[in-house]
Image (cartoon, grey):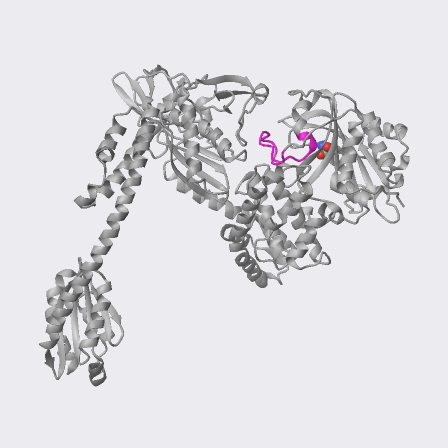
Amino acid sequence: MSIFVNMNSSEIRQSFLDFFKEREHKIVPSAPTVPFEDPTLLFTNAGMNQFKDVFLGTGTRDYTRAADTQKCIRAGGKHNDLEDVGRDGTHHTFFEMLGNWSFGDYYKKEAITWAWELLTKKWKLDKNRLWVTVYRDDDEAYNLWKTETDIDHSHILRFDEKDNFWEMGETGPCGPCSEIHYDFTEMGCKPEDVNAGIDDVMEIWNLVFIQYNRNEKGELEPLPKKHIDTGMGFERMVRVMQNKKSNYDTDVFEEIIKKICEISGKKHEGENISAINAIADHIRTLVFAISDGAIPSNEGRGYVLRRILRRASRLARKLDLKEPFLYKLIDVVVEKNGKVFPEIVDKKDYVSKIIKAEEESFNVTLDKGIELFNNVYEKIKNNKDKIFPGEDAFKLYDTYGFPLDLTEVIAEEKGFKVDTNIFNSEMENQKERARSARKSELVLAEDGDDSLNELIAGKNIIYNPYDLSPKGIATEILSVKRIPSSDIDLIVLKENPFYSESGGQISDTGKLIFNGSELEVIDSKNKYFIYVKDYDGNRIIDKNPKAIIDLERRLAIQRNHSATHIVHEVLKRVLGSHIKQMGSLVSDEYLRFDFPHFQKVTDDELRRIEDEVNDKIFQNILVNTLVDIPIEEANEIPNVKKFFGEKYGEKVRVVIIDENFSVEFCGGTHVKKTDEIGLFKITKEESISSGVRRIFAATGEGTKKWLNEQNEKVKAIYTAWPEPFKKNIPENLSVDKIADKINKTSYDDGKALKDASKTLDEALEIYNKVNDEYLESKKKEEKENLKKNLSVIFEKIKNEIDSAKSINDVKYLISEEKIYSKDELKEISDFVNSNFKDGVAFMILNQDDKVNLLLYVGDIVSSNHGLNAGKLVGEYAKKFGGGGGGKANVATAGLKDASKVEEVKNGFEEFLKEKLK
Ligand code: SER
């Protein structure tokens, strides 16, 4: 039996760090779980990620030994543990990795000796339960274990690449490794039980001897120096030290599991265990990833999170939980981990809102999806092939938001496999449908069209949209290709000055000017291709045109682009550090910017954002662009903004608007000085999906246009008012005065426009107030008119009743009136009802250009003669192409053709006679 040192999880973590601190390691903080800076990684999957640059020799630190606990997520990519979560007690999507590093400092000997010392001397683990593995031909490590430790030599095993060569991803630093495993079995395990996937024989620590880089071609390149990278599974180590059957039984998970049991009223036992464990795992992943800036969405890491959350929601159904509940677990996660990872404390409310909203939106379809699944399952449950149809899996995905892996899990629980081939082909079909829908809008360059590559192969083409030449540049046409079934030609120029859509900035348009003719350039793509209308490569015209950009348009685009950089930084400052660019569009007319934020941005915040952006613009800052900066150097610039998903080359451009304010990697084009931007105006703020907001804004001419549009709206309100109300508007706030003020200001005089905009705001307030008064008085007037009108009508009907004619003793009247509102119909029928019980009244009630027919049959008449108003009016109206119906007593119908009113009126007497025969 081992002698365990009695420690809780926090003490174990601290004890590890202290051990290495005593050995001159610098204790460093964990990197975020979301590696926004490394496009090769979905999530931080190992402690070494943050040191990748040091291993590759492209970066340095001011220390050569480090230790930490790193937040890791392994749910997608090369290291993916999602499928094992809930099935065993050792895997997690989120876990902490304790690690110690040497950057070209100590190597195998110290790494091995210290690992052994910590485990067996400081933590007093039973040596008989420890096994180690080395890479098959790593004799050095093999011998070090023998000579430097007192491990039982029969416990040193050799394995091949699969187990003992560690790589962080498809590319990146890597090397042979030596793992330490712990044997929980009663009787002691055998060598073949190590690395055999047995829950009770578990890897606890991996010592990696980093010495290669796997390059993009898949080759191993030796690194300039050798390094140590170790990773100890924290939750596993806690399990060992607390001698538990599963990581989930340790104090790391205790409170979360307690809370799940409390909310669901279920016990952590029997078949509940796996659902509860998986939920406990998933909530940690969600809390850490969202706090670090990831957001559930439909692609990339966002989709991984969404899948994890949906799995958890569905597992909750197994615990009979129907309402959103994951968000209720956040507190215990934060409580347990907030001291070590304070970022989750700061972001708690934000994370809670995101998770709750996601749960709510999935809950809407979850039950229906499960029902669909069960219906399908009922039909196929006796099938021998045990295949769940791919079409249904696709329907679950498409209609009910079930990620494929979720359907797979549910199917697997019933012993079924999803037909993923069919699922994938359904998915392809859907994409194809979407593609062709887009194509019909005339897609100009087809991605992956090899014939396009031929057009540029071997040619030395210059792409330079950065030096604006208002008069155009002389260039040469190198290749031409007609876009099939269109009048558009794709042209390759020797020098292309037209900006090609990228990074959200739209393409330039312009002209190619030939000797005596000119052609319109409507687009530019992939840097080398421009599109013109009807050049026709066979026509013999000049091959040396002048290329001129539509300058006005380009300058407007640039204003919006520079404003985008400014607003990005201001949003961060006003709304918080969680703000980042999730999408952006920079056009000549406006800019659009998407960012994660849970609430609506309040009016007050919008005003502050606008003001701060404009203050920055008015400071007239010189926009500084650094070109061809080696990426390693650019990465080191303080506060630099980069975008995940963008592929940056070896050299990048960096756009700086005040080095203490906005510094961004950017290939776009910008103004020279910020006051060219004019006035920045947010024109709209909205939500585009849960937790993601979008703003639209204008600059330059766009702002003027928007101000004018607002003023026009005011004018429309004003025009509708009668004179007395118009008098309430002070002369200096008249729409014409405001229009004047806006129009006589030049778009780049931001301050003057701001003033005009302020006047417009003031005016709006007054106009709205007056308009409310006007609407109020209008309502009152209408009511009075109605009353007056009704009393006139009643008077008239009264006379008509008195002089009513009759057919076979049935009195009747036929009348035509003008009414103003539908409400009068009821009043009129009530009036007739109280005064004409022994008669029939047919009334044509004209309301604007609508004709209402009202038929009233008094009680006495309907009982004596069996007449039914509903039937009669329907039948009568039908003759004239109308329709209607109602009760036996009163009914109405509409007449579509107002020109038939006379006919309708004159024909009724005859119709009634027929009915009374
Ligand atoms: N990079 C290794 C791992 O993740 C050791 O830290 O296992």
Classified by dominant secondary structure, the portion drawn in magenta counts as loop
State the extent of the magenta-drawn residues as a range: 32-49
Residue 386 rendering spot, x and y as whole percentages: 63, 57
Instruction: Give the answer, above or below, for where 266 lies relative to 59.
Output: below
- The answer to if 768 sits in the magenta stretch is no
Residue 116 rendering spot, x and y as whole percentages: 85, 33
Instruction: Give the answer, above or below, for where 297 lies relative to 511.
Output: below
Q: Where in the image, quadrant-wise, is ligand 1 located? A: top right
Residue 339 rendering spot, x and y as whole percentages: 68, 38
Quadrant of residue 769 within the rendered picture: top left
Residue at position x 83%, y 28% in the image: 141
Relative placement, left or right, of 135 versus 457 is right
Residue at position x 65%, y 43% in the image: 334
Residue at position x 64%, y 34% in the image: 44
Residue 397 rendering spot, x and y as whole percentages: 53, 50
- The answer to if 37 sits in the magenta stretch is yes
The number of callouts visible is: 0
Res 371 seen here: yes
Relative placement, left or right, of 57 versus 850 is right
Quadrant of residue 526 within the rendered picture: top left
Instruction: Give the answer, above or below, for where 676 lies relative to 364.
Output: above
